[in-house]
């Protein structure tokens, strides 16, 4: 039995569904159709088991097609966090303590609920050196939408609280929000919320880079506001970060084979729009560069369980690091086998003549420890991604509507492997953050079940002016120093936008999205 779907976890879903379908796992194959646009929910098997059962019962080829209402209601949603958070700092603004309590509304099913709750331990307060912290989180079963993976799994909820609170704390102390962050971000000797050292120190340099642009933006907003009128302008900051991996000893495997024309690489690096094919091609080409193989002579075999090994699911911003390292390992094995005593390399014909194997497996496992569920402590990710974001907004005080006019991010995702692919991920993540901040919701099954009704941002909502400034700090455990990218830019753009709204008009939104009526209600409260 063969199931074609847009699964981003072929071998994972095979394991999860074979028994439920009632099929012999050895006679069951999943193939990915790379349709793009899953943004994480396809970490869960949604239609594979249904198709499998239908095929077994009917003994005929079957397909499943959803209309938009079915698509939106059947697929999982990001689990809301309800967070109570407290910071403690000294009179100079240095953070000394944090206390957190969070509840995760995970809907009716337990799948991955424990993991997203653990993300609270990893990302509430992330980015800051806080020597004393305590907290408790819980997963709550409800009759709301079922919770599934969604881009930047758990960190947008966590960082929304801690990044908005950072602005509130800065104001209490009388510090500029950017300088408060600069004082408190990770430096040598700092630890993450899970008690481990950061993989690299990236934030101080990134803030130094952003500072002159921030001062310029603040001055422009001030000048506009001094002219008067109904539109108020503001600037907001947020730290963005996420880890690469599925916590602890995350593994991936690939194969590479020398052919008469070049090489063929097999990997289950699932593609949901992020450019998995480019990742496989680039790491293969770069590693085999001494052989002089051109990109057009590298053939890719991807995402078919009959042909490709278990590279793991494409989630948790893991693939570029974990599968990238596996590709490098496999290609190095091949080169080692091809190397002659004089340091030159055997040709394909010479390998065949000497009866040397042409195909080699590449495997890589992250040597890290998953967080303890009771203490929240551990070293879960081999690399992290970092960004410092500035959002500039205009708030119409007559309607409460917010327009994001410009976004500027200093991004540090390690060595840039492919600039076009990297920037595509950053642009997309930041624009998704606009929807998270201002318009997206899923409460009303009549209102929120079209693409417009559920508040997905449209082209008019995205600023034409998005500036990406690259900072490259090579990662010790990343392939060629690279980290991931996909989930960092959606970790906290909403916090930056909410902070900018407060800077513009004095309204502090603590419950997303910041609908115009919420901002308007806040303005009326201020004017009482």
Image (spheres, rainbow, N blue to C red):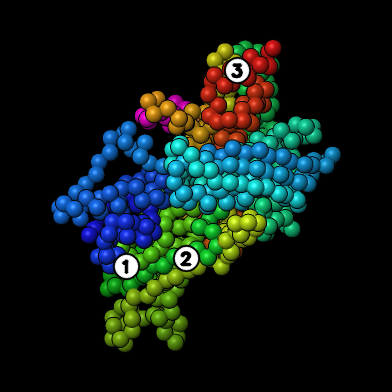
Label 2 and label 3: CA atoms lie apart by: 50 Å
Q: Magenta stretch?
A: 448-462
Q: What element carries label 1?
A: strand
What residue is at 61 percent from the left and 59 percent from the top? 372
Q: Tell me, yes or no, whether the two marked residues, 2 and 3, touch with CB atoms within 8 Å.
A: no
What residue is pinned by disc 3?
A: 521
Residue 60 appears left or right of 305: left
- Residue 285 or residue 381, whichever sits in front: 381
Q: What element carries label 3?
A: helix
Q: Does the magenta stretch include residue 455?
A: yes
Q: Where is residue 211 in the image (x, y as percent from the top left)?
A: 69, 39
Query: Looking at the image, can residue 15 be seen?
Result: yes
Q: What element carries label 2?
A: strand
- Which of the 4 quarters of the picture holds residue 220? top right
Q: In this view, does 257 lie above or below 170?
A: below
Q: Where is residue 386 in the image (x, y as percent from the top left)?
A: 60, 49
Query: Looking at the image, can residue 470 be seen?
Result: no
Whichever of labels 1 and 2 marks the residue nearer the N terminus, that label is 2
Q: Does the magenta stretch include residue 170?
A: no
**Other residues around mark 1 within 10 Å, as few (<14) / some (14–19) / many (≥20):** some
What residue is pinned by disc 1?
A: 264
Whichever of labels 2 and 3 marks the residue nearer the N terminus, that label is 2
- Residue 47 or residue 250, whichever sits in front: 47
What residue is at 48 percent from the left and 45 percent from the top? 151
Name the chief secondary structure element in magenta: loop
Whichever of labels 1 and 3 marks the residue nearer the N terminus, that label is 1
Report the quarter where the C terminus lies. top right
Label 1 and label 2: CA atoms lie apart by: 21 Å
Q: Is residue 504 above or below residue 273?
A: above
What residue is pinned by disc 2?
A: 251
- Of tags 1 and 2, the one toward the viewer is 2
């Amino acid at each position: 039995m063969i199931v074609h779907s847009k699964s981003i976890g072929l071998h994972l879903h095979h394991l999860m569904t074979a028994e439920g379908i009632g099929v012999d796992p050895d006679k069951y194959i999943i193939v990915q159709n790379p349709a793009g646009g899953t943004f994480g929910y396809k970490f869960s098997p949604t239609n594979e088991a249904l198709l499998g059962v239908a095929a077994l019962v009917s003994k005929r080829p079957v397909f499943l097609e959803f209309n938009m209402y079915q698509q939106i209601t059947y697929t999982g949603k990001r689990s809301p966090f309800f967070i109570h958070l407290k910071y403690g700092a000294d009179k100079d603004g240095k953070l000394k303590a944090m206390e957190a309590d969070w509840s995760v509304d995970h809907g009716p099913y337990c799948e991955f609920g424990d993991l997203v709750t653990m993300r609270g331990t990893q990302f509430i307060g992330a980015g800051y050196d806080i020597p004393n912290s305590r907290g408790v989180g819980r997963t709550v079963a409800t009759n709301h939408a079922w919770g599934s993976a969604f881009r930047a799994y758990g960190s947008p909820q966590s960082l929304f609280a801690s990044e908005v609170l950072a602005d509130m704390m800065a104001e209490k102390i009388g510090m500029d929000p950017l300088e408060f962050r600069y004082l408190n971000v990770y430096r040598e000797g700092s630890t993450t919320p899970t008690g481990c050292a950061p993989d690299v120190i990236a934030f101080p340099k990134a803030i130094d880079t952003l500072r002159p642009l921030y001062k310029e933006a603040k001055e422009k907003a001030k000048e506009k506001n001094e002219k008067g009128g109904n539109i108020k302008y503001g600037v907001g900051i947020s730290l963005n970060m996420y880890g690469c991996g599925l916590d602890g000893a995350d593994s991936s495997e690939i194969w590479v084979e020398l052919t008469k024309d070049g090489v063929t690489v097999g990997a289950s690096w699932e593609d949901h729009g992020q450019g998995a094919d480019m990742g496989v091609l680039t790491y293969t080409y770069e590693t085999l560069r001494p052989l002089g193989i051109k990109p057009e002579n590298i053939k890719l075999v991807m995402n078919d369980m009959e042909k490709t090994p278990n590279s793991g699911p494409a989630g948790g911003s893991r693939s570029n690091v974990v599968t990238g390292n596996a590709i490098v390992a496999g290609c190095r094995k091949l080169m080692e086998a091809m190397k002659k005593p004089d340091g030159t390399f055997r040709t394909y014909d010479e390998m065949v003549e000497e009866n040397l194997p042409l195909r080699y497996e590449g495997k890589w496992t992250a040597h890290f420890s998953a967080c303890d569920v009771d203490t929240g402590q551990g070293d879960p990710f081999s690399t992290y991604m970092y960004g410092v974001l500035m959002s500039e907004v205009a708030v119409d005080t007559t309607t409460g509507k917010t327009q994001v006019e410009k976004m500027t991010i200093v991004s540090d995702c390690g060595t840039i492997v492919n600039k076009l692919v990297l920037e595509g991920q950053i642009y997309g993540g930041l624009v998704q953050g606009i929807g998270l901040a201002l318009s997206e919701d899923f409460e009303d099954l009549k209102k929120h079940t079209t693409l417009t009704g559920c508040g997905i941002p449209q082209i008019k909502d995205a600023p034409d002016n998005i500036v990406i400034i690259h900072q490259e700090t090579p990662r010790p455990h990343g392939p060629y120093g690279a980290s991931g990218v996909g989930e960092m830019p959606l970790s906290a753009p909403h916090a930056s936008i909410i902070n900018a709204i407060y800077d513009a008009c004095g309204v502090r939104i603590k419950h997303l999205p910041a609908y115009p009526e919420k901002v308007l209600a806040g303005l009326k409260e201020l004017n009482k």
